[in-house]
Image (cartoon, rainbow, N blue to C red):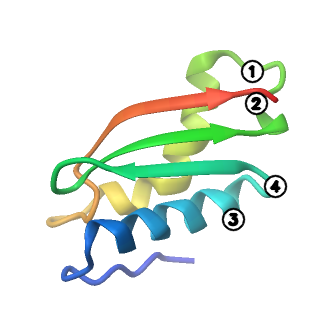
Amino acid sequence: MPIEVQANLSSAQIAETIHETILQAIPGAEIEVRPGGVGHFEIRVESDAFEGLGRVKQQQLVYGAISELLSGSNPPVHAIDKLDCVVP
């Protein structure tokens, strides 16, 4: 299902969209999204889904969830400055 994000959303609203999008892809995850500069975010995801996966595979799960927010001619998310994936 395509993600539709309006261009005029605040960083806090985009952070909430990121949170909800990751939660849909990784149910039960504990997620913290912090806005940085315009279009920049820091994300921390804690989930059992990361068990047994290397760091790159863990991050690929998260990036895969939010890829639509990072693509297009004027994406709402320009960069993830920090991504922490944690196994509980």
Dividing the picture into quadrants, the one containing residue 50 is top right
The span from disc 4 to disc 3 (Cα, nearest Å) is 9 Å
Do the numbered discs 3 and 2 sit on residues whose CB atoms are within 8 Å? no
Give the residue type that dot 3 points to: Gln
Query: What is the C-alpha distance between the residues marked 1 and 4?
Result: 17 Å
Whole-angstrom CA distance, mark 3 to mark 1, is 19 Å
In this figure, which residue is indicated by the disc labeled 1? Answer: 53
Q: Which mark is residue 50?
A: 2
- Mark 1 element type: loop
Residue denoted by label 4: 28
Q: Residue at x 67, y 60 (%)?
A: 23
Label total for image: 4
Task: Check disc 2 and give the amino acid type.
Answer: Phe
Badge nearest the viewer, 4 or 2: 4
**Label 3 belongs to which residue?**
24
Around disc 3, counting alpha carbons within 10 Å, would you say few (fewer than 14), some (14 to 19), or many (20 or more)? few
The answer to whether the residue labelled 1 contacts the one labelled 2, judged by CB atoms less than 8 Å apart, is: yes
